[in-house]
Image (spheres, rainbow, N blue to C red):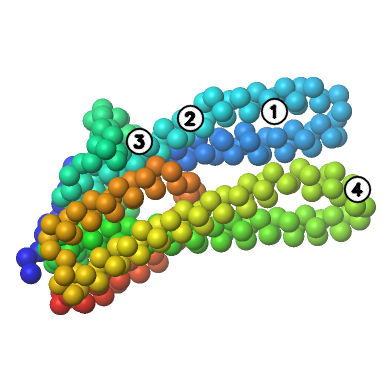
């Protein structure tokens, strides 16, 4: 089988420029997410505690809480969604160029302006070490229509697995917070009314956010697994030799449409968790790509 140039081109100057821009735009989106979390969860909890302990501050606390809600609705949430859409467009540009797919304006709209990419690329502070070899290098041994499917399947598995693990961390965090609060309440011998008023009520928004976010991550992972199952079915056809090049290319474009929509709508993952999970997942991803290609006689 004739190979392709994905391994070399994914580390080229132009591809790395897109990856740096994508990473910077996501970094800004994470900042917006942290600001949103502070405005909608952390600060209201602090305000509730202050209002409980100092009744005279309640009017000011109420005004601050209202202002933060308006700030989130009018600015932070819109900026966050815009950032996710822009990052998804940059990812789409990377995938289309690297995997040799046509741009689908019906599914994605127009490409992001080059000035936006240049600005984000210039501001990315962390270099290229973690951006190199974005897709498994071994896919270079396969024809482009086969390598494309392997890369897309890898993308879907990686994202689903990452979100599943992140959701578990969130559930665990919520459980530990509740357990710590119960222990604290017992330690200071609060009666039930005081425990609810001084500990449970202020902590509820934080625990509620963690549980809600965990379910959102789980739902996103489930959606990715559904698309991955379609990629697995296509791979079975490739193994059997029943997927002509044109059909594989058409199906890959359909998968890419789904991947783009998920990138736009999926919740973010905090970098500290991503960095913790990344190395092991990349090893699994590369080994899986080798296994898949051996199924069609490529070592």
Q: Which residue is mark 1?
A: 65
Q: Residue at x 85, y 43 (%)?
A: 197
Q: Which residue is mark 2?
A: 78
Coordinates of residue 112 in the picture (x, y in percent):
28, 33
Q: Quadrant of residue 280?
A: bottom left
Whichever of labels 3 and 1 marks the residue nearer the N terminus, that label is: 1
Q: Quadrant of the C terminus?
A: bottom left
Would residue 33 appear left or right of 58 to someone viewing this image? Answer: left
Helix, strand or loop at label 3? It is helix
In the rendered structure, find residue 86 and report the number of the disc placed on it. 3
Residue nearer the viewer, 142 or 243: 243
Whichever of labels 1 and 2 marks the residue nearer the N terminus, that label is: 1
Coordinates of residue 73 in the picture (x, y in percent):
56, 28
Cα separation between marks 1 and 4: 25 Å
Whichever of labels 4 and 2 marks the residue nearer the N terminus, that label is: 2
Cα separation between marks 3 and 1: 30 Å
């Amino acid at each position: 089988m004739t190979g392709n140039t994905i391994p070399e081109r994914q580390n080229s100057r132009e591809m790395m420029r897109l990856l740096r821009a994508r990473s910077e735009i996501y970094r800004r989106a994470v900042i917006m997410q942290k600001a949103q979390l502070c405005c909608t969860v952390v600060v209201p909890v602090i305000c509730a505690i202050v209002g409980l302990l100092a009744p005279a501050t309640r009017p000011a606390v109420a005004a601050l809480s209202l202002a933060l809600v308006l700030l989130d609705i009018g600015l932070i949430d819109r900026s966050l969604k815009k950032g996710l859409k822009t990052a998804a467009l940059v990812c789409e540009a990377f995938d289309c160029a690297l995997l040799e797919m046509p741009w689908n304006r019906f599914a994605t709209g127009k490409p992001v302006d080059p000035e936006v990419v240049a600005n984000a690329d210039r501001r990315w502070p962390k270099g290229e070490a973690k951006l190199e070899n974005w897709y498994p290098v071994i896919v270079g041994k396969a024809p482009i229509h086969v390598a494309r499917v392997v890369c897309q399947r890898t993308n879907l598995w990686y994202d689903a697995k990452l979100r599943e693990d992140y959701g578990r961390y969130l559930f665990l965090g919520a459980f530990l917070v509740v357990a710590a609060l119960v222990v604290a309440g017992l330690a200071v011998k609060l009666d039930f009314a005081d425990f609810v008023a001084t500990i449970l009520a202020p902590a509820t928004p934080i625990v509620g956010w963690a549980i809600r976010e965990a379910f959102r991550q789980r739902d996103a992972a489930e959606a990715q697994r559904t698309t991955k199952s379609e990629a697995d079915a296509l791979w079975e056809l490739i193994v059997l030799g029943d997927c002509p090049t044109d059909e594989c290319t058409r199906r890959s474009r359909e998968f890419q449409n789904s991947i783009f929509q998920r990138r736009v709508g999926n919740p973010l993952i905090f970098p500290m968790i991503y960095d913790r999970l990344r190395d092991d997942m990349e090893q699994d991803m590369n080994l899986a790509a080798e296994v898949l290609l051996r199924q069609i006689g490529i070592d």
